[in-house]
Image (cartoon, rainbow, N blue to C red):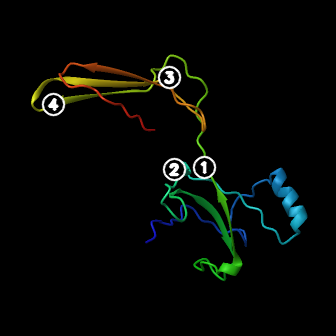
Amino acid sequence: VKFSKEMTIASSQVAPCRREKVETLTAIQEKLVKKMGPCAFPFTFHFPEMAPCSVTLQPGEDDQGKPLGVEYYVKCWVGNNEEDKGHRRSTVQLAIKKLQYAPLGRVGNRLPSSVISKGFTFSSGKINLEVTLDKEIYYHGEKIGANVAISNHSRKQVRNIKIYV
């Protein structure tokens, strides 16, 4: 069973050039054209704004195969016409990631928090659990500090607390 879906979110013909306006080459494009020669066709790719960020779900211990997530590839091929999808020998692809950077320190915002109440059928009162994180933005590999507050207004005992991220 394969749990993947491949979609084309943008496509354009690079050669022969069909663009109305000529874009200036970047420094990297100039170096590549100089290195590759006159048969190189530089192009610019604009990522759609509404495309989701690249994400990969970490596989569990029992999982095999490729991890699930959102991946992007720039795929170029040589074809006889626009509808031609290209063959394996005439296709190259480059994996790219769309990243979203967190804004720099915003002052005065509330810290992330969540409150849940649990009532019991044959017992009066509720247990309230509130979790507050110690800051708004975390970066990969950074420790997450959580403050847990429990208000027990019932006759039940709280035996253990598990927190998952």
Judge the density around disc 4: few (<14), some (14-19), many (≥20) Cα neighbours within 10 Å.
few
x, y percentage for residue 132?
42, 24
Ranked by sequence position, the earlier of labels 2 and 3 is 2
Q: Amino acid at mark 4?
A: Phe
Mark 1 → mark 3, Cα distance in angstroms: 28 Å
Q: Amino acid at mark 3?
A: Asp
Q: Amino acid at mark 1?
A: Lys
Number of numbered discs on residues: 4
x, y percentage for residue 154?
18, 21
The residue that mark 2 highlights is 52
Q: Residue reaching furthest left?
A: 122
Mark 3 → mark 4, Cα distance in angstroms: 31 Å
Q: Nearer the viewer, mark 4 or mark 2?
A: 4
Q: Residue at x 60, y 49 (%)?
A: 98
Mark 2 and mark 1 in contact? Answer it, CB < 8 Å: yes
Label 3, secondary structure: give it.
loop
The residue that mark 3 highlights is 134
Instruction: Place residue 162 in its image quadrant.
Output: top left
Mark 2 and mark 3 in contact? Answer it, CB < 8 Å: no
x, y percentage for residue 5?
47, 66
Q: Residue at x 59, y 59 (%)?
A: 72
Question: In the picture provided, is 151 more to the left or to the right than 31?
Answer: left
The residue that mark 1 highlights is 98
Q: Nearer the viewer, residue 152 or 36?
A: 152
Mark 4 → mark 1, Cα distance in angstroms: 46 Å
Q: Amino acid at mark 2?
A: Pro
